[in-house]
Image (cartoon, rainbow, N blue to C red):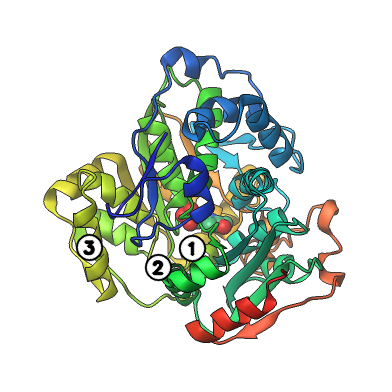
């Protein structure tokens, strides 16, 4: 299996190299050259299997020669052993034909753990075999960073630096990043918003001297291995509702477009998905774009669903690549226009996008009202991101096709917003209830590329 860049000019890489490098050297994102299909029988055989067995079937064709079957099985087993639910991704019913896929039973209580725990094991296995070390730098709107730190803390061949927007993430998110005491963990509070963090990260990857000097590796959702890990729960949940013999639809609270793009990959592999619904908060660039209004940056407005406060949705580039017939040159041009503020999507590409994706948005009031209503009607306490999904899903349901809404975080990760909406203060699960007592370690950094690169060079362990 070979991986190519969405901008067409970076070297073609193996799974292992695409995973370890993250962003392609032409500024693009790696995608598989072809998407392997699973047969109806292979999908049907997943019924009743463990999450780990389904994960092996779904991901194995993408990994190629990088790991042996047994090595890959062991990696999967270790990745999900720390989850607080034996089903890993349990499905609960909200209403007739409407189901909630709970993706928040991992160690940091958000769906990012599904990918990051796997990536930690993949990196460790590959790097120790090569006798190499890397510096992981990540940008986070809250959940990616905590999941990355949890996955890489204490690993010998990795230093991990995470930039988050100072003052714009929840206290639980912050504490999950600042309380680990391992010396390879570095939390950086940046003066700026998430788009600034993400832009500085891209700048570092495009500075080849720095990139090669510190052996920079990326684990943001641009990393193909992360998207791949997320394809699995589309299969496990759809099969439990009757796929491949029955169609299903999904609604996905969306920010960087990684999670929903994984659903699109599942569909390409043969899972009968009828609709993939993008749900956004008031930062609705994706909803506007999918409604035919072009892709134009606005200012990011902070919301009660901070993990979706994004204007430049990095994985959307992968969707555009397919929509433009895999023309890397066309994508590179759009991305140049985006630097200057935005671009229009061609009519042909728009048609392809709308064939696969629908979209909706939820205001702050909609989000709070949905948290309150879902609690009253189902007893389910939703986090604000999941509530956005539930609200938009209700608007897109079609009789006869089950709708699965992805619950992306545990309500206890956003207690202030959940309490204000519902009057119920969601407690942390017992396994992490001392989080508020642990001491914090963090460095305040400016939104300045040179200063950031200096800080990282000086703090890498050798
Ligand atoms: C990251 C995140 C999202 C958005 O996921 P994308 O893959 O960036 O679209 C939604 N909800 C929560 C809780 C998240 O952490």
Which residue is at the far left? 347
Depth-wise, is mark 3 or mark 1 nearer the camera? 3
Q: Are marks 1 and 2 in contact (CB under 8 Å)?
A: yes
Residue annotated with mark 1: 308
Specify whether tag 1 is near ligand 1 (CB below 8 Å): yes
Q: CA distance from mark 3 to mark 1?
A: 23 Å
Foreground residue among 58 and 387: 58
Q: In the image, what residue occupies the spot 56% across and 24% down?
A: 240
Asked if residue 314 can be seen in this view, the reply is yes
- Residue 382: where, in percent of width, then height? 61, 53
Element assignment for label 1:
helix
Among the two numbered marks 3 and 2 on one chain, the one whose residue lies closer to the N terminus = 2
Element assignment for label 3:
helix
> Which mark is on residue 283?
2
Q: Are marks 3 and 2 in contact (CB under 8 Å)?
A: no
Q: Are marks 3 and 1 in contact (CB under 8 Å)?
A: no
Quadrant where the image shows the C terminus: bottom right
Q: CA distance from mark 3 to mark 2?
A: 21 Å
Q: CA distance from mark 1 to mark 2?
A: 8 Å
- Seen in the picture, residue 19 relative to 384 is either above or below; the reply is above
Q: Is residue 324 left or right of residue 204?
A: left
- Residue 422: where, in percent of width, then height? 64, 61
Quadrant where the image shows the N terminus: top left
Residue annotated with mark 3: 334
- Residue 345: where, in percent of width, then height? 18, 57
State which quadrant residue 265 falls in. Answer: top left
- Seen in the picture, residue 363 relative to 315 is either above or below; the reply is below
The 10 Å Cα crowd at callout 2, few under 14, some 14 to 19, many 20 or more, is many
Q: Is residue 196 left or right of residue 344?
A: right
């Amino acid at each position: 299996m070979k991986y190519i860049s969405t901008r067409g000019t970076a070297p073609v890489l193996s799974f292992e190299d695409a995973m370890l490098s993250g962003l392609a050297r032409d500024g693009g994102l790696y995608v598989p050259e072809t998407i392997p299909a699973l047969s109806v029988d292979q999908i049907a055989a997943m019924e009743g299997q463990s999450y780990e067995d389904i994960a092996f079937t779904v991901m194995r064709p993408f990994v190629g020669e990088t790991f042996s079957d047994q090595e890959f099985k062991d990696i999967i087993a270790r990745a999900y052993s720390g989850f607080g639910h034996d089903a890993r991704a349990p499905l609960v019913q909200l209403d007739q034909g409407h189901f909630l896929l709970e993706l928040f039973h991992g160690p940091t209580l958000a769906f990012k753990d599904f990918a990051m725990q796997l990536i930690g094991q993949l990196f460790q296995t590959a790097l120790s075999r090569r006798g190499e070390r890397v510096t992981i730098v990540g940008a986070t709107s809250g959940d990616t960073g905590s999941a990355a730190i949890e996955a890489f803390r204490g690993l010998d061949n990795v230093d991990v630096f995470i930039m988050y927007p100072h003052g714009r993430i929840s206290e639980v998110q912050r504490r999950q990043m600042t309380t680990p005491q391992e010396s390879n963990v570095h939390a950086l509070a940046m003066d700026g918003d998430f788009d600034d963090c993400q832009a500085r990260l891209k700048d570092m990857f495009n500075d080849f001297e720095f990139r090669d000097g510190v052996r920079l590796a990326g684990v943001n959702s641009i990393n193909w291995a992360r998207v791949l890990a997320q394809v699995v729960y589309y299969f496990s949940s759809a099969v439990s509702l009757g796929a491949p013999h029955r169609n299903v639809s999904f609604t996905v609270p969306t920010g960087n477009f990684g999670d929903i793009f994984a659903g699109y990959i599942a569909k390409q592999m043969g899972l009968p998905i009828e609709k993939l619904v993008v749900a956004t908060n008031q930062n609705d660039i994706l909803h506007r774009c999918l409604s035919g209004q072009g892709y134009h940056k606005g200012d990011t407005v902070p919301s009660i669903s901070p993990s979706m406060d994004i204007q430049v949705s990095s994985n959307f580039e992968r969707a555009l690549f397919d929509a433009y017939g895999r023309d890397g040159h066309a994508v590179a041009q759009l991305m140049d226009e985006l630097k200057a503020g935005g671009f229009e999507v061609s009519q042909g590409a728009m048609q392809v996008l709308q064939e696969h994706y629908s979209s909706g948005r939820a205001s702050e009031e909609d989000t709070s009202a949905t948290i309150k209503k879902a609690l009253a009607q189902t007893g389910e306490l939703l986090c604000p991101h999941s509530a956005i999904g539930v609200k938009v899903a209700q608007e897109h349901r079609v009789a006869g096709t089950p709708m699965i809404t992805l619950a992306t975080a545990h309500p206890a990760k956003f207690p202030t917003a959940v309490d204000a909406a519902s009057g119920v203060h969601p407690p942390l699960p017992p396994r992490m209830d001392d989080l508020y007592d642990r001491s914090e370690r963090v460095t305040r950094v400016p939104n300045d590329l040179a200063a950031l690169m200096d800080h990282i060079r000086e703090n890498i362990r050798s």
